[in-house]
Image: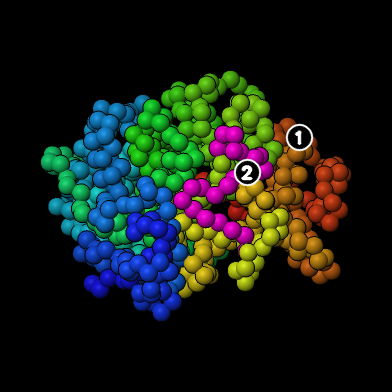
C-alpha cells in the first residue's frame, strides 16, 4: 500500500521532534528544513487498520523529544516487553501471579505466549493485521493472549467480560473482527452477538478445541512478526456511554511510549516490584498498569479476577504488593475497611489513582491512614495512558500534577487560544501518542490545531500544576454562575456521614439549571436533607450549594469505578 507522509518538525535532531500531517494530506516542508518522514512499510497482510486511520490533516502533533522515544523502524512491542526483558534480566523472574497462588516466570510466560501465537497463525489462520477480540476475566491467560496476538502481528481488541451481546456486536462490526479468544465462562453473550463470520476459540474449558488444549501441540519458539513501529497493535474502544463507542487505534511504539514516559519518569518502577489493581485489561488504564509497565520494568503483576476493595485489601497484604493502580472510589472504600480491621500494607510503596478526579480529602485521608502519597493522574483512552501526574515531593494534593516528561499541555479557550494561568479552560495535550479514531468523524472534535482536546476543564497555575475543574460537559450553569460539580462533590465528602457523592445539573425554568446532589450515607448513618443543606452552606458560596438532595444506596459506576453521571441525569 502507498505509505502516508507525515512531517518532522525540527527539534535539533532527526530522531527527536514533532511529527504532523500537512493540512493538505501531503508532505509539507518541516520548519527545520528536514526531509519528510513516512509511515514505515506495514507488515500487515490485512491492511484494514492502516486503511482506516484518520485522514492525514486530522492527526495531532506527535512529540519525540526524549531520547528513549527514538524507536527503531521495525518494532514489535510484545517482543520488547517479553523477549527483550528476558534477554536483559533472565527467564526465571516472576512475571504474572494469580489470586489462586499460581505464579508464572518470564520464561513460562514466553513459552505460553509463543504457543498461543502458533495456534493463532498455524491452526486458526490469523494473519498480521487481523483483528482478534479478547474477552475474559483478568488473569494470566488473558494477558498471555494479548501478548500473543500482538507478537503474531495481529491487532488486539480487548473488551470487558461484562459487555453484553449488542455491545460486542457493535465493536466487532466497527473493527471487522474475524477471530475471538474468549474465556469459557463468558461465551454466552458472544454467541448471542451473532457476529457474521466470527471464529471463536474458547479458553479455560475442557473441550478438545479449547485454546489450552490446542497449545499442547506446539512447542517451538515463535519468532515475533517484524511489525513496523507505526503498525496498529491494538484498538481500544471507549465506553460509548453517550453514544456510539469510538475505537482508538494505537501503534506498537505507542505501547512502549507510555512506559517510557509516565512509568519511567513518574512511577519509576523497580524489577522487584509487584503490581496489582482493579482496572480490567479491557481498559487502557489496566493494560498499562498491570501488563505494560511491570513487563517493561522486569517486575511482576498480580492479576485478580475480582479486584473489588474487599478482595483487593487482603490480596495486597498476602502477595506483598508494592504498586497499586485503582480509582478514587476504591481508595475511599479501602479506607473504610482499614478502619474496621487490620491489613498489612507495609510492602506498598506506590499508589496510583486515575479514571476520575481524586478529591483532596481522599488523598489526605489515605496519607494519614497509610503514610502513602497517592500519585494522581489524568489519562485518556485516546492517548492510551497518563500524561499529567506527579509523585513524591512533587505532589500537591488537590491538583492532578504537572506534565509528564515527553508530553506538553496547555489550557485553551474554545477557539484554541491559550488562557492565562489561573483561568479555567479546556485541557489540550500532545506527546508521543495521539488520538487516531477508527474511521470516525468525531476525530475533528478531539484533535484541533495539532492538539488533543480531552474534554476536561482545567486550571493551570503559575508553577505548572494543573487542577481539575470538571468535565467540560459537566459544568453546571445556574443563574449565570458556572459551577464545577467536582468542587461541590468534594464539599459533600467532607461531611463525616457521606460515603460517596455526585453532583449534576437539573434543568430549571428560572435558573437554567440547579445543582442536584446525590449522596450515599455511610453504613449506620442517618442523613437528612436539612442537615446536609446546613453543612453545605458553611462550606460553599450560596450559589454553589445544591438546591436538591437525593439519597441512594450506591452510585452508578463503570467496572473501573468511574462515576456514570449520565445515569443520574436519567433519574431526573
Q: Nearer the viewer, mark 2 or mark 1?
A: 2
Residue 3 at x, y = what percent? 27, 70
Check residue 401 for magenta coloring.
yes
Q: Nearer the viewer, residue 268 or 355?
A: 268
**Mark 2 and mark 1: span between their CA atoms?**
18 Å
Residue 7 seen in this snapshot: no
Where are the magenta residues, as a range? 391-412
Q: Secondary structure at mark 2?
A: loop
Residue 550 horizontal side relative to residue 405, left or right: right
Q: Are marks 2 and 1 in contact (CB under 8 Å)?
A: no
Q: Nearer the viewer, residue 36 or 447?
A: 36
Find disc 1 in the rendering and name its residue.
Answer: 496
Residue 525 at x, y = what percent? 75, 34
**Residue 146, relative to residue 351: is it above or below?**
below
Residue 147 seen in this snapshot: yes
Check residue 198 for magenta coloring.
no
Q: Residue at x 25, y 27 (%)?
A: 92
Of the residues under marks 2 and 1, which one precedes in the sequence?
2
Q: Residue at x 75, y 49 (%)?
A: 488
Amino acid at each position: 500500500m502507498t505509505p502516508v507522509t507525515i512531517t518532522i518538525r525540527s527539534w535539533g535532531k532527526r530522531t527527536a521532534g514533532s511529527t504532523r500531517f500537512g493540512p493538505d494530506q501531503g508532505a509539507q516542508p518541516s520548519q527545520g528544513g528536514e526531509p519528510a518522514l513516512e509511515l514505515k512499510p506495514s507488515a500487515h497482510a490485512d491492511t484494514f487498520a492502516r486503511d482506516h486511520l484518520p485522514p492525514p490533516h486530522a492527526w495531532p502533533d506527535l512529540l519525540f523529544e526524549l531520547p528513549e522515544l527514538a524507536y527503531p523502524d521495525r518494532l514489535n512491542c510484545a517482543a520488547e516487553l517479553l523477549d527483550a526483558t528476558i534477554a536483559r534480566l533472565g527467564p526465571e523472574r516472576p512475571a504474572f501471579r494469580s489470586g489462586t497462588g499460581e505464579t508464572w516466570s518470564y520464561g513460562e510466560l514466553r513459552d505460553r505466549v509463543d504457543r498461543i501465537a502458533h495456534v493463532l497463525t498455524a491452526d486458526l489462520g490469523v494473519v498480521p493485521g487481523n483483528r482478534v477480540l479478547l474477552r475474559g476475566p483478568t488473569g494470566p491467560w488473558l494477558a498471555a493472549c494479548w501478548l500473543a496476538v500482538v507478537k503474531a502481528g495481529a491487532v488486539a481488541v480487548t473488551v470487558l467480560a461484562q459487555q453484553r451481546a449488542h455491545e460486542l456486536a457493535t465493536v466487532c462490526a466497527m473493527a471487522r473482527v474475524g477471530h475471538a479468544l474468549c474465556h469459557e465462562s463468558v461465551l454466552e453473550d458472544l454467541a448471542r452477538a451473532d457476529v457474521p463470520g466470527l471464529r471463536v476459540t474458547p479458553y479455560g474449558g475442557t473441550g478438545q478445541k479449547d485454546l489450552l488444549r490446542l497449545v499442547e501441540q506446539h512447542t517451538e519458539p515463535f519468532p515475533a512478526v517484524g511489525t513496523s513501529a507505526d503498525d496498529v497493535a491494538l484498538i481500544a474502544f471507549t465506553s460509548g456511554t453517550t453514544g456510539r463507542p469510538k475505537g482508538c487505534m494505537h501503534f506498537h511504539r505507542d505501547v512502549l511510549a507510555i512506559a517510557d514516559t509516565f512509568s519511567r519518569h513518574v512511577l519509576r518502577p523497580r524489577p522487584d516490584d509487584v503490581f496489582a489493581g482493579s482496572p480490567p485489561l479491557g481498559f487502557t488504564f489496566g493494560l498499562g498498569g498491570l501488563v505494560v509497565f511491570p513487563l517493561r520494568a522486569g517486575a511482576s503483576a498480580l492479576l485478580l479476577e475480582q479486584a473489588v476493595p474487599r478482595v483487593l485489601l487482603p490480596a495486597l497484604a498476602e502477595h506483598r504488593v508494592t504498586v497499586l493502580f485503582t480509582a478514587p472510589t476504591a481508595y475511599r472504600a479501602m479506607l473504610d475497611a482499614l478502619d474496621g480491621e487490620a491489613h498489612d500494607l507495609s510492602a506498598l510503596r506506590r499508589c496510583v489513582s486515575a479514571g476520575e478526579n481524586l478529591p483532596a480529602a481522599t488523598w489526605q485521608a489515605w496519607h494519614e491512614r497509610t503514610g502513602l502519597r497517592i500519585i494522581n493522574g489524568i489519562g485518556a483512552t485516546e492517548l492510551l495512558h497518563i500524561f499529567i501526574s506527579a509523585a513524591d515531593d512533587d505532589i500537591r494534593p488537590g491538583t492532578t500534577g504537572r506534565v509528564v516528561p515527553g508530553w506538553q499541555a496547555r489550557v485553551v479557550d474554545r477557539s484554541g487560544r491559550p488562557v492565562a494561568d489561573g483561568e479555567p479552560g479546556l485541557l489540550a495535550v500532545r506527546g508521543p501518542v495521539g488520538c487516531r479514531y477508527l474511521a470516525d468523524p468525531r476525530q475533528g472534535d478531539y484533535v484541533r490545531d495539532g492538539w488533543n482536546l480531552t474534554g476536561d476543564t482545567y486550571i493551570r497555575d503559575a508553577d505548572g500544576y494543573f487542577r481539575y475543574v470538571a468535565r467540560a460537559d459537566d459544568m453546571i450553569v445556574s443563574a449565570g454562575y458556572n459551577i464545577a460539580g467536582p468542587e461541590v462533590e468534594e464539599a459533600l465528602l467532607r461531611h463525616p456521614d457521606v460515603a460517596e457523592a455526585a453532583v449534576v445539573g437539573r434543568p430549571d425554568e428560572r435558573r437554567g439549571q440547579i445543582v442536584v446532589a446525590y449522596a450515599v450515607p455511610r453504613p449506620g448513618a442517618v442523613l437528612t436533607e436539612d442537615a446536609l443543606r446546613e453543612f453545605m452552606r458553611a462550606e460553599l458560596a450560596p450559589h454553589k450549594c445544591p438546591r436538591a438532595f437525593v439519597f441512594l444506596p450506591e452510585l452508578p459506576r463503570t467496572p473501573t469505578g468511574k462515576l456514570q453521571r449520565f445515569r443520574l441525569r436519567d433519574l431526573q
